[in-house]
Image: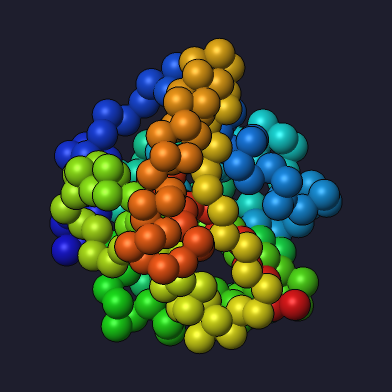
Amino acid sequence: MTDIWHQYTKDYYSFFDETQMALELKYIKINYNQYLPKDKGSKILEIGFGRGSFLAYLEKEGYTNYLGIEIGKQQVDFVKEKVTSKVKLVYNTLNFLKKHKNTYDLIFLSDVIAHIPKEETIIYFQMIRQALNSNGVIVLRTPSITNPFCLRSLSNDFTYTTYYSYESVRQVLSLSGFNKIIIKEESFNIGLKGYIYQSTLNLCNFLLRPILILYNRTSNLILTKMMIIVASNS
């Protein structure tokens, strides 16, 4: 499996596109900025940084004490060249977290936990919780399995192993010791095209939601492709 991660970005998406990066920075601003620490010297860790969009945003916003860790050498080399030198190749994330207990103000993961086998998920989140300081926060993004029209895009990545709903991601975080959990839909309201897309998506989901409530007997439905989760120890 390690060989897959070394070539993950090469096989799955093109490495660098400035237009796409600009859009990703805007996406990060509207979805995550409110959860970032006010102190620019706060200790921030990103696990699985991919192309480095979140790290680029931290650099752009003046954060100085951040680190990204990755299992894939290709990603590390690329981000070192294009984004920041504050990255590290880490083959065993759990061992890294064990060595950094009570360290971080914020730990960020985007499109990571869907790659983690179910039997390893609880210990993974427990180690993340222990690596946070007493007021630390975890922010993550992962595919939502709720919307049936998103299933095609969720199957695009062969390395996904676990999918989550509102209930299951809350369950996993609660079992891992987190007691304050926020789960919400992602936003695409970026510029005119983003506004049009978001408005169209809202209309479609408005029509779809009653049907899914009827079938699933719950109103806790995340109908965007991805869901944003924020959790803390206190």
Q: Can residue 92 be seen in the rendering of this structure?
A: yes
Q: How many marks?
A: 0
Residue most extreme to the top: 192
Question: What percent of the width, then of the height, locates residue 136?
Answer: 71, 69
Relative to 230, 61 lies left or right:
right
Which image quarter holds the C terminus? bottom right
Question: What percent of the width, then of the height, locates residue 35?
Answer: 70, 52
Question: What percent of the width, then of the height, locates residue 135?
Answer: 77, 72
Question: What percent of the width, then of the height, locates residue 57?
Answer: 61, 36
* Residue 169, quarter of picture: bottom left
**Which residue corresponds to the image point at 42% horizontal and 39% vertical from the top-left?**
207
**Which residue corresponds to the image point at 42% horizontal and 82% vertical from the top-left?**
122
**Which residue corresponds to the image point at 55% horizontal and 81% vertical from the top-left?**
174
Residue most extreme to the right: 39
Of 204 and 70, the residue lying toward us = 204
**Which residue corresponds to the image point at 20% horizontal and 43% vertical from the top-left?**
152
In the image, is residue 161 above or below residue 148?
A: below
Relative to 154, 16 lies left or right:
right
Of 186 and 156, the residue lying toward us = 186
Q: Which colour scheme is used?
A: rainbow
In the image, is residue 217 above or below residue 36?
A: below
Q: Can residue 95 be seen in the rendering of this structure?
A: no
Which image quarter holds the N terminus? bottom left
Relative to 106, 98 lies left or right:
left
Of 154 and 20, the residue lying toward us = 154
